[in-house]
Amino acid sequence: MRKIPKGIIIFGALFTVTSFLQMSNFIAYSRAGYDDLFLLSLPESAIFLRGFFFAVLRIAGLAAGLGVLTGKEIFRKTALFVAVARVLTFFSEHPYYAVKKHVEAAVAFASLKTGIFKIAEAPTVGFITKFSFFVLFAIDVGFAAVLIYYCTRPQVRQWFKEKG
């Protein structure tokens, strides 16, 4: 029986930590009314279903992150499912208008705190919004794509089959 590949350790740890952090952020934002504030254009039932779906996805990610370290094939498949779901639902998890509202609120707060009101101008907010959206996309979709690529490699699939 071969020892656990380093990639599995890295992905398992990253998946576990990020899922845990996302879940704790989700709980904190839910209590603070984040979705209600930034997703005002959606009906309440849609906000609830969106929150429920992403909570389930985060729990599955946490289970997959811990589970791949055991070498069970079901957890590799769960990790692949979560990664594909993250790619397919990126734009509903991070709607551009919600990112923009978040940036506007953060920039307004920063300009009030610093007294530099020039940073709250539209070109600055537009640039920060686009940059933030790009970073969110690169992190979520990039991580998912690399995970999908790695977990579908023949050597990795073989390791999971050997572990049983």
Image (spheres, rainbow, N blue to C red):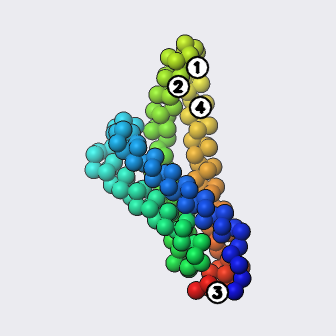
| Residue 6 visible within the image | yes
68 up-or-down from 58: above or below: below
| Circle nearer the N terminus (2, 1) | 2
* Label drawn at residue 162: 3
Amino acid at pointer 4:
Ile
Residue lying at 40% horizontally and 56% vertically, measured from the top left: 55
Task: State the image quarter where residue 121 is shown.
Answer: top right
- Mark nearest the camera among 4 and 3 is 3
Residue depicted at x 57% and y 29%:
126
Dots 4, 2 in contact, CB < 8 A: yes
Question: Callout 4: helix, strand or loop?
Answer: helix
**Are the residues tagged 4 and 1 within 8 Å (C-beta)?**
no
Label 2 element class: helix
Mark 4 or 2, closer to the camera: 2
Residue matched to label 4: 128
N-term mark: 4 or 1? 1
**What's the residue at 44%, 62% (across, down)?**
59
In what element is the residue under mark 3? Answer: helix
Front: mark 3 or 2: 3
Q: CA distance from mark 3 to mark 1?
A: 57 Å
Q: What's under tag 3, amino acid-wise?
A: Glu
Q: Position of residue 120 (x, y in %)?
A: 54, 20
Q: Is residue 39 visible?
A: no
Compute the Cα span from label 4 to label 1: 10 Å
Q: Nearer the viewer, residue 19 or 144?
A: 19
Q: Label 1, on which residue?
A: 119
**Alpha carbon distance from label 4 to label 3:** 48 Å
Query: Considering only order in the chain, which callout, 1 or 3, is on the residue closer to the N terminus?
Result: 1
Q: Which mark is residue 67?
A: none
Q: Identify which residue is drawn at 52% across, 18% down.
A: 113
Q: Position of residue 52 (x, y in %)?
A: 35, 56
